[in-house]
Amino acid sequence: MTASPEDVPEQVLRTSIVERLFAREADPRPLFTHQDHGAGLDHTVTWTEFVSRVRVVAGALRQVTRPGDRAAVLTGQDLNYPLAFFGALAAGLVAVPLMAPGSPAQRGRLTGVLADCDARVWLTSAAAAVKVREVGTPEQLIVVDELSGPGIDPLPVTSESPAYLQYTSGSTREPAGAVIPHRAVAAACWQASRAYAVDENTTCAGWIPFFHDMGLIQLLCLPVHAGARAVFMSPAEFVHRPARWLRQLADHPAVFTAAPNFAFDLAVEAAGEAGDELDLSDVRVALNGAEPVRPRTVARFLEAFGPRGFRSEAHRPSYGLAEATVYVASAGAEGPRGAVFDREALAQGRAIEVPDGQELVSVGRPLGQRVRIVRDGVAQPDGLAGEIWIHGPNVAAGYWGRGDEAAFAGELDGLGGWLRTGDLGVFHRGDLYITGRLKDLIVIDGRNFHPQDIEAVAGEAHPAIRRDRVAAFGISDEMGEGAMVVAEWAKNAEADVKEVTRVVLRAVSREHDLTLRSVRLVPSGDLPRTSSGKVARAAARARYSRPRG
C-alpha cells in the first residue's frame, strides 16, 4: 500500500461545492468565460452575476421537483451548462451531466442514459431546446436562459447526499452512472487544488467536455472550490482548430489546463498555425491524462513549445477515473518522470529496469487517498504489477440503480470501501505506472500483451496511420488465440495498403515478438469512439473481428 502524504481535512469534506459558490456571492471578479469562436466573442459572467442566476434556476426547479430527483443537463458547452449544473445542485437535486444531442449515435446513448437515471426534469438552453425535444418528452423541460423570477437560497445537503451521476464513457462496458456524493466532489477538488497548485490567481483553461469527469471537475467545480477563473471553449472548436487551445493558454495568466494525450499531439501539429510569437511561459500546469501518456508525446511537446516558454516541469502526467471523481495520482512539481522496463518481465507482472526495453511514463503519486496494487487478492510490494485498488473520500458511492456492484464490494485485510479500478499498474521507486486494463488484456500462449503498447508501435510505424486512432484487441478463431490491429488512415495520406500493412506487422513483431493475425486499415473517422473521444476497443472488436465477406 502507498499512503498519501496528506489526508483530506474533515472540514473540506463537510463543505459542499454549492456552499463555496454562494460564499463568494459578493465577488465582482470574472468566474466563467465562454470563448465563442463561431461568433468571435468571449462571454463572461462574474461570481455575483452567476450566483444570482443560479438562485433563479434553483427557484424554478424547487417548484416542480423534490430533493433527490435527477436533473439531466442537456446543453451545449456554453455558460448555460454551469448555470444548469449548479442550479440543480442548489435545488437539492442530483445533476446528470450529459450533452446537447447531436448525431443519431449520441441521441441513442442519451436515450439509454436518460432512461437509466429516470430524470424527472431536463435542463437545456434556448439554442439546444429543439434538438433536446427530439430525444423525448420529460415530465419537465426547463430552458435555463429563459428563466426569470425570484431566486432561493440553496437547500442544505449532507456530505453523503448524491451531487451528480457521472456516466462512464462506455469504453469497456455499457454506460453506468457512478454516484458522486458531495464529499467526493469536495475531496476531488481539494486533491486537484493541492496537486496542481490551483488558487484564486489561477486560470483553469481548456476545452474538455463538461459531461466528461475531467472537464466537469477541471473547468466547473475546481474553479468554484478554489476561487479561480475558468476560460473554456467547446471541444468541437478545439478539434476543428487545435491552435485555438494554444492561443487560449498564451492569452491568460497562471494557467492550469488539462487534456488527453492525443490533444498534445494535435497541438504539436498545429504549432506553425499558432505563430512564432506564442508565449507559453505562464502555463503553470498542463495535466496529461484520461488515456495512456506516451513518452514521445511528452518529448515532442517540449521540443515544439520549449522554445516558446513552456517549461518541462509544467507537463503533469496523471491518472484518474470517473468512479474516483477523476483524481487518483499525478506527477509532482518536478514534472514527467519515466523508466525503461524489460518487456518480457513486465508482461509477467514484474517491473525491472533495463537499458533498452519498454519506456513508460510515471503518473506520479497519490494524494488524499490510499492506493494498492492487488493480485489474486494479495497486495503487491513495489515492483510487482496487479490491479489498482483505491480507497479514499473521493471514491463514488456505487452505481446508480445497481446496488453494491463487485467493483465496490471488494475487501482487503478486512477493510471495506476499496474500489477495484480494472486498471493494471505497478509501483516502481514509489511512482505509479499504468500498464493496461484488465478487461483489454490480450493473452496469447500464456503471454500478456497490453493493447495500448501494440497501438503505440502501430501508430508510429508509418506516417499514413493516425497515431491516436489505432485499436488492438485479442481474437479467437480456429487458429487459436491471436491479436489484430485496426488503424485509421491519416487525412490526405497517400500510401500503398500492402506496404503500410507490412510495416505495421514488422514493427509489432520487432518490438513485442508478436505476429499479428491481421492489420486492417479503415477510413479516417471509421473507428468507434467513446463519448470522450477515446477509441472504443470493445466496439472495434465487435465491428472488425468478424471475417469480411
Image (tube, rainbow, N blue to C red):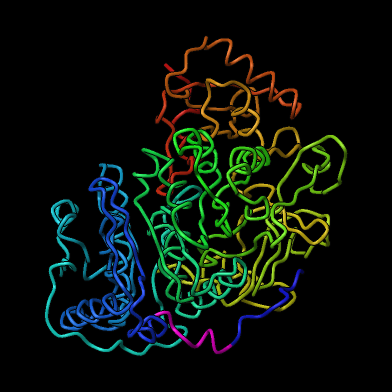
345, 412: nearer the viewer: 345
Q: Residue at x 61, y 72 (%)?
A: 194
Q: Position of residue 183 (x, y in %)?
A: 50, 80
Report the side of 416 relative to 385 (left or right): left
Rendered-image quadrant of the N terminus: bottom right
User: Magenta: predominant secondary structure element?
Assistant: helix
Q: Position of residue 500 (x, y in %)?
A: 57, 15
Q: Position of residue 481 (x, y in %)?
A: 65, 30
Is residue 159 depicted above or below 32 in this figure?
A: below
Q: Position of residue 362 (x, y in %)?
A: 71, 52
537, 238: nearer the viewer: 238
249, 11: nearer the viewer: 249
Q: Is residue 518 magenta?
A: no
Report the side of 175 relative to 278 (left or right): left
Residues shaded magenta: 10-17
Q: Is residue 13 magenta?
A: yes
Say whether residue 134 is visible. Answer: yes
Q: Residue at x 80, y 42 (%)?
A: 340
